[in-house]
Structure formats: C-alpha cells, structure tokens
Image: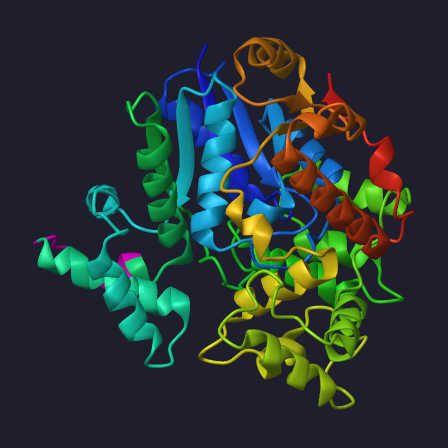
Amino acid sequence: MRVIGIIAEFNPFHNGHEYLIRKAREIVNDPRAIVMPVMSGFFTQRGLPAICPPAVRARQALLCGADVVLELPFSFSCAPSSRFAEGAISELVSTGVVTDIAFGVDTDDTSLLRSLAELDLETEDFNSRLNTYIDTGISFPEARSLAVKDIAKAKGIGGDLDAVLSSPNSILALDYLLALKKIDKKNKINIIMIKREGSGYHDTNTEESFASATAIRKVITGKASVNYSRSAIASGLNGLMPDLSLGVMLSANSGNTFSFPDYAGYMKSCMLKASSSDNLDDIAYMSDDLSGYIRNFASDLRPGTITDEDQGLGLFESKISTKRYTLSRIERALASMMTGQDRSYLEIKRPPYIRVLGFNNEGKYCLKIIGKCAKIPVISRPSDCLELQSENESLKKIFELDMRAASLGWKLYGKDTASEWSAIPVIVK
C-alpha cells in the first residue's frame, strides 16, 4: 500500500491543494495511493486562527482527494518553520505507514534544495554567522537565510541561492528535508517535490485559478463583516476553490456550524491582555525583548489602529511589524500568550500523539493498519487523551494546550468554547 503524507494548512482548501494531491498520485503512478495530510488545527503557522474550524477544512480535503486527515498540535502548527516542519514530519513518520511525503516548492531546482539539506546547520560556525546577522538588527528568517547562503558558498554549492532562500515555500521545503534527514535516518521515505502552480505564497491576485490562500482569505475577510453576503463570497471565490470545497465552507457557515472569525475582535483581546499583563517574558517566542515591545505597543494603542471593518488586519499588521520583529513571530507570540504556551512547551520537540480529524472508506482501512504500526498513541476524540495523560507528561501538556487553543478558536467561530469535547472525526462515504 502506497501512503503519501502531505503537510498542509488548507486555510482554506483551494485549487493548488487539489493539484498537489492529484500530482502526487500521478508521480507515484498509483491512482489508488492513500493520501494522508497532516493539517494545522485552530491556529496556523502564521500565528492567526484559521479561517474555518479544523473539521470543516478536513471535510473539504476528504471530498477533494484526501483519504485520511490528521491534526498537527497547536505547539507545532503555530510555530516557526523549523518546528512546524519537524513536528509535521515526525507525526507522519510516527504513523508507521507513510511511504512518500509530498510538498510544494517554488523552484525547479530541487537538486539545490537537496544539496542545502545536506549541510550541517547545527555547528558552532553556523550559529556564529546566524548571531552575527541577527545582531545587525534584521529578522531571524533573514539572518538564517544569509547564514545558510554563507555555509553553502563555503561548501561550493552553486545555483540561485537567493531565489530559493527568499521563497516561503522553498524555505519550508528545506526545513522538511532537514527534518526528514533527522527523523528518517535510513532514507526509507520517498520525497516528492512538486512545483507550485500560479500565484506566490503571499500574492493577493485573484485573476487566475491557482490563487494563493492569502488571496482567498482576503476575499472572505473583505465580505465577512457584520452584514456580509455569502453570495458575494461565493461569487468572489468562484473558480478559485474546487466547487466541493467552496460548497462545504459556505454550507457549514450558513448552517451555523461556525461564523467566520472576528480577527479584529481577536486582536483587540490580544492587545488588552498584553497591556494588562505584568510579565510576558516567559511566553513562547517573547524573547529578544519582544515582550516589552508588544506591551508598549498595546499600551500606546491609538483609536482606529484595529477597526471592525478591517477583518484582514492590514492596518494593524502594518503598524506593529518591524524589521526586527516579523509579523508572523509577533502573531505566534500573541497566540502563545492567549493560549498559555510558555517556553517550557518548546522543549517538547515532537508531537506525542496522532489525532485523526477525518477519513473516507479507503482511509478507514489505512487507519486500521496505523493502529497496529503507530509509534505514538492514536486518538479520534479528545476524551481518548484523558486515559493517557497520567502515563505521559508531554502528552498531557500538549493535549491541554490543544484544548485551550480549541476553546479560543470556537469562541472566535461564535460557538460554545467547550465544543471541542464533543468533536468526532469527519467521515466521508
């Protein structure tokens, strides 16, 4: 049985995701290959709540080509690319059944990515270069890219390093490869890199069918105000998402399964909590005096910086981000503050359990095999974790953090904060 692992956010599921699934099956030459995405839960890598609850996004994926959907715990999904990648790769490998892992890249030069992944980026030399660049006042991602480029040139690695190391998808791809080198030491898993089609990661263009998730969310948040129109959202997204995916999202929204999140309200709550907190220093990602910067920014907040009409947070994000502190880092730190994730959680390097969000008939058979082969516990609903907590302190911490993230997420989706306790996997016949 061929099982293709995919790492995704499906925020929301769009044409590019459907293409990735279809192309992965074509490359392994097996139309019946099981496709198993591991997906972010209530919060994404960028640091903001997802546009739809996990169950809605899981159903979108299952109706558009996936067979089993797993959830990546909050501590790994709302994290820098290296932690995100290692957490996701680890969870897929821990199933014991994955034969291939597929992901998108923004470059045709996949051999360059493979060469970069062979570099040792945990040496004193690399860390020295990284810290030197950070001391100049640039952001961590920029400093890391420059340090990687220096090491690559020193090792005689050629190619368009600038293009590869400036692309968000290719940087993530490099982190996937580095994680695989660390976790899949015997190189058992086949790696499939698929060239991304259409708009770039942050492109807001909606004139082509392969629009980015950023562009799609912008259409939704632009309409999802108090008096928004679902027909306007449907019209704006027509052709940008598979019909089934768009239908699932709008049907769940109209059926009161969830409301599109109030991002402005969420950020106001973040700022209120930050300004009233005596000490944020122990919160994850608040190092390098970010805690002081956020607290001062929140205390000096001026009227109109976070407006109810600006659900995309464009104005707020333009004001709070700096050259030193990237927007994603700020928003991940705020999400950690809101969920109570302190630095101790970051010492847990890999997910301690596998949570199943949904499956179809083919996926059901795959899950039976995972039940026998998995290297860590497999759960289908939150109550499953209750029996395991006393045996595993890391599992208990990550699970409780996930439930706090879910509680906050459901509040933003306009539902009971305890809704997650009754959640069961999505089943698609």
Which residue is located at x 90 percent, y 48 percent?
415
Q: Nearer the viewer, residue 230 or 292?
A: 292
Q: Is residue 270 left or right of residue 129?
A: right
Residue 290 point in image, percent of width and height: 55, 75
Q: Nearer the viewer, residue 192 or 348?
A: 348
Where 21 falls versus 298 (above or below)?
A: above
Answer whether residue 269 is magenta in the image: no
Where 354 falls versus 34 (above or below)?
A: below
The quarter holding residue 267 reads bottom right
Q: Is residue 233 left or right of residue 394?
A: right
In the rendered image, is residue 56 in sight? yes
In the image, the segment drawn in magenta is 156-164
In the rendered image, is residue 160 in sight? no
Answer whether residue 160 is magenta in the image: yes
Residue 245 point in image, percent of width and height: 68, 39
The quarter holding residue 124 reads bottom left
Which residue is located at x 41 percent, y 33 percent?
102
